Amino acid sequence: MIRVDLINEQTLAAPEANQFQYWLAALEKHQTAEGEVCIKIVDEAESQSLNHTYRNKNRPTNVLSFPSEVPKFVASDHLGDLAICASVVAQEAAEQGKSVADHWAHMTIHGVLHLLGFDHVDDCDAATMESLEVTILQSLNIDNPYAA
């Protein structure tokens, strides 16, 4: 089971911890995963700073994933951390004609899949990751986020 530790110091509009837990329970039905994920809701300035520092992209982004780097000899069930920018998620949802809640679900699942080792650097990996995202989201009655 994936457990959520939610940090929302920004008092920005964001789902409650139990909503994140619900989405991640759907992920677990399709992907073996156990551990703890810390989700921090950030503003655009913090998102931009993190994105610039860790990805060399000087703009805010929807979700950043930071896999746990605990040494193998240390017992830990921490999968990693997510930084999700509430205003970017809301803006993207509006631009893409999606509900904000559905986009939060997508960004959360997308971020945790990165923590589990999935990526979309090349077309083959992207197809695998997107297919899994679509399957998980469909189990939550959320439409394919990649459909035109």
Image (tube, helix red, strand yellow):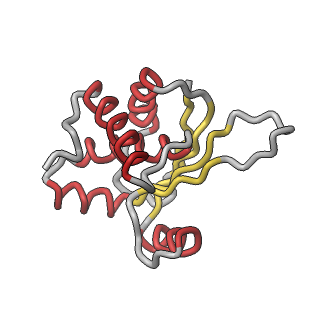
Task: Please say if 122 is above or below 71.
Answer: below
Number of marks: 0
Q: Say which quadrant the N terminus sits in.
A: top right
Asked where in the image residue 85 lies, by quadrant, the reply is bottom left
Q: Position of residue 102 (x, y in %)?
A: 26, 42
Task: Please say if 62 is above or below 103.
Answer: below
Q: Position of residue 145 (x, y in %)?
A: 23, 45
| 81 sits to left or right of 132 | right
Residue drawn at point x = 38 percent, y = 59 percent: 62
Q: Nearer the viewer, residue 63 or 45?
A: 63
| 78 sits to left or right of 46 | right
Residue drawn at point x = 39 percent, y = 34 percent: 19
Task: Please say if 45 is above or below 142.
Answer: below
Q: Nearer the viewer, residue 104 or 129?
A: 129
| 49 sits to left or right of 29 | right
Q: Nearer the viewer, residue 138 or 131?
A: 131
Residue drawn at point x = 34 percent, y = 30 percent: 136
Residue drawn at point x = 48 percent, y = 27 percent: 31
Q: Position of residue 42 (x, y in %)?
A: 47, 61
Which residue occupies the extreme bottom position in the image? 58
Q: Position of residue 66 (x, y in %)?
A: 59, 53
Which residue occupies the extreme top position in the image? 29
Which residue occupies the extreme right position in the image? 73
